[in-house]
Amino acid sequence: MRKRSWILIMISMLLIFITACNKENMEPEALVEQEIKIAIENAELSGTLLEADNEKALAIIVPGSGPTDRNGNSAVGLNTDAYKKLDMGLKENGISSFRYDKRGVGQSKAGFEGKEAESDYDDVINDLVKIIEHFEGKNIWLIGHSEGSTVSIIAAQKTEVQKVISLAGPGENIADIINWQIRENKANPPEIIEACDKIIEKLKNGEMVDEIPDYLMALFRPSVQPYLISWMKYEPAEEIAKLKCEVVVIQGDADIQVTIANAEKLGEASGVTPKILKGMNHVLVEVDGQQEQVESYSHPELPLHPELINSIVE
């Protein structure tokens, strides 16, 4: 009888041990994300709040150009989940985050349907100001990716934030960036480059362009021209020099959309040394060669560059 009791005790202890091991190997608890809606004029912006335990700061992730949503994806073929991966990495380091759909994108479409021609760059900046005001009282960092870098820099002049972190942000006028990108594409024949030069020159001077070749309509269609004109009035390097808060500039040396020279201009203007991450491209992953570069824009399972999160939080 006593022997049987000892056997039962040993079996029970073994079961407890196995259960404990299984718990250690279980998937981590699901992230608790909160949907937040922020009112703006005649509409609202929708985003996701991910709160960290023992919060050190709240990072607002400001999306890049085009119809980019809160996760870093768009309907024009971009599928990266870059911002979703970014906020999970921040949470592990005690930093809460808010990522949002830009006006007219994702869950922020209501009130913006068919109004592209009325869109203005200052509206996007003021949207971010509204978001910052919504979280008033928190220790706010702005993490602006690509176009979101310039948006963050200007919004930070209008309100109170602790840090502005530029990820792959332009240091030159967007007119010059577009011009460079068109020239860098070796598939573009001289006639396309010449046509773009003429269009960009007029837009930078604040003039609308009526006649757009069909092959350039996606980039310079009349309804998007007011937005481009209002964007081209800003010089990012001049704007970042106006900031009173802490500035961090991070750039990848494998970025085919924004060059290291842009990061250097931002760094020089703000008095900081840019952090250059070897192998990081524009969608914030590590790549080696053209094939990986192309694939990274449509493979959301790829991890962020291994040094990116530490470069932000340290």
Image: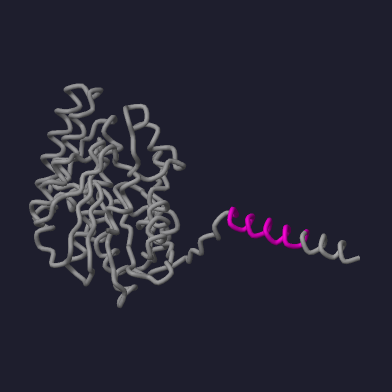
**In the displayed structure, would residue 276 be above or below residue 10?**
above
Q: Nearer the viewer, residue 28 or 207?
A: 28
**In the displayed structure, would residue 283 be above or below residue 114?**
above
- Relative to 34, is 237 on the left or the right? left
Q: Quadrant of residue 198?
A: top left
The question of residue 12 being in magenta is answered with yes
Placement of the C terminus among the 4 image quadrants: bottom left
Q: Position of residue 89 (x, y in %)?
A: 39, 55
Residue under the point 14% across and 48% down: 171
Q: Position of residue 80 (x, y in %)?
A: 41, 43
- Relative to 267, is 94 on the left or the right? right
The question of residue 160 being in magenta is answered with no
Q: Nearer the viewer, residue 80 or 233?
A: 80
Magenta segment's dominant SS is helix
Residue under the point 37% across and 45% down: 304
**In the displayed structure, would residue 33 be above or below residue 84?**
below
Residue placed furthest toward the bottom: 137
**In the displayed structure, would residue 284 be above or below residue 101?**
above
Q: Give the residues drawn in magenta, as a range.
A: 11-26
Residue under the point 12% across and 49% down: 206
Q: Position of residue 53 (x, y in %)?
A: 43, 69
Residue under the point 15% across and 44% down: 262
Q: Nearer the viewer, residue 161 or 172?
A: 161
